[in-house]
Amino acid sequence: GDSRGLITRPTLVWKVNASSGGERLVRTTYQTAGITWRADYNLVLDAKDTSADLGAWVSLLNLSGAAYENAQLKLIAGDVQRIQPQPVRRFRGGAAVERMAGADGGFEEKSFFEYHLYTLPRRTDVKANATQQITLFPTARNVPVRKVLVYDPTAMFAEWGLIGNWGDEPNRDQSSGLTDERKVDVFVRFQNDEESNLGMPLPKGKVRVYKQDDTDGTLEFVGEGLIDHTPRNEKVSVRVGQSFDVVGERTQTSFAVSIGHGTIDESYKIEIRNRKREPVTVVVRERLFRWMNWEIVQHSDAFRKVDAQTIEWELTLPPDGVRAVTYAVRYVW
């Protein structure tokens, strides 16, 4: 600073009132902005899409303007509430730099408050304005997985928040039931438990999915999706893309409103076409979006009620096969 007390560099000034002199050991704790982290996962499928290897990384970014040498690195994973907008996940001790593949088996994990704490069991240097990847845990081998195809043409009703927010009357607009969605979503699912060679709490992050090309042995990228914070023994479902050779078509076949009786009668035909040279199984999902009270009054195939507003069919199609389901629903208000 200068004679007028102006400080031109970041400075911490303490005034200490002590009853006696001498050296003291003091630990200080403070929060600094500009240091964030995320989890990244690589899922490598086998030839039959029934098993996979899962690698996990921590990507750290330090934009705090300072470097930290020989730092102890701790990561807190969970939905940590902050009054000011900040990254949900944070860690103490700074962020590190440069890629460090196979770093001593990764982090040691333990429960901490209502979150999970991951501690790097060694010191690391933290340089400014750089990113680093450190192994979160050793690659899990031979994780049983299942590839699931889902045709969900009414997903937008849930995404838009329309289900459960009807107001005083049901949705009587006939055009609301129309959709031109033909794409079938592809999910990869696995169980996060010891039986599946996993069982560690998985922080929220991005999962990149690869599969080996048998022709030349190279790994090819087949899609990516996000997972939320996932405790052990819970199911993980990653949406990786949409099928090229399996398509769906949804047709509204009737619609009638009776104000006097307080009913809406509606029916649909849903067709799935498999253009693969192998059989496939497709989950067909329908959201009963018009009103809270409904009854399926006709159906061509047995369905499963998932929740208060959702039903599903599971259809198996032969190579180059076509299957259709029909149903009629009555809403009463």
Image (spheres, helix red, strand yellow):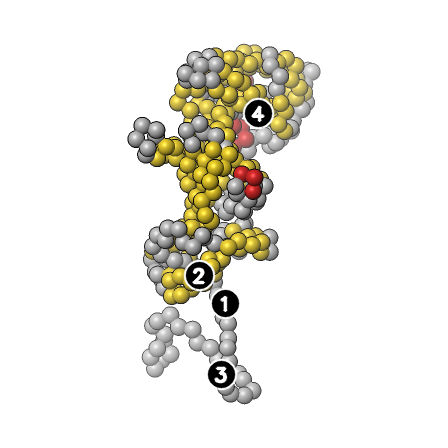
Marks 1/4 in contact by CB < 8 Å: the verdict is no
Which marked residue is nearer to the observer: mark 1 or mark 4?
1
Residue 287's label in the rendered image is 4
The residue carrying pointer 1 sits among few (fewer than 14), some (14 to 19) or many (20 or more) residues within 10 Å by Cα, namely few
Residue labelled with disc 1? 29
The answer to which of marks 1 and 2 sits earlier in the sequence is 1
Vertical comparison of 189 with 319: above or below: below
Q: What amino acid is at disc 3?
A: Glu
Which marked residue is nearer to the observer: mark 2 or mark 4?
2
Q: Judging from the image, what secondary structure is the residue with disc 3 in? A: loop
The answer to which of marks 1 and 3 sits earlier in the sequence is 3
The answer to which of marks 3 and 2 sits earlier in the sequence is 3
Cα separation between marks 1 and 4: 50 Å
Q: Residue furthest bottom?
A: 20
Q: Measured from the top left, where is residue 225 in percent x and y? A: 44, 37
Vertical comparison of 30 with 202: above or below: below
Q: Judging from the image, what secondary structure is the residue with disc 4 in? A: strand
Residue labelled with disc 2? 122
Q: What amino acid is at disc 4?
A: Arg
Who's the residue at 51% across and 34% down the image? 144
Residue labelled with disc 3? 23
Q: Quadrant of the N terminus?
A: bottom left
Which marked residue is nearer to the observer: mark 3 or mark 2?
2
Marks 1/3 in contact by CB < 8 Å: the verdict is no
The answer to which of marks 3 and 4 sits earlier in the sequence is 3
Cα separation between marks 2 and 4: 51 Å
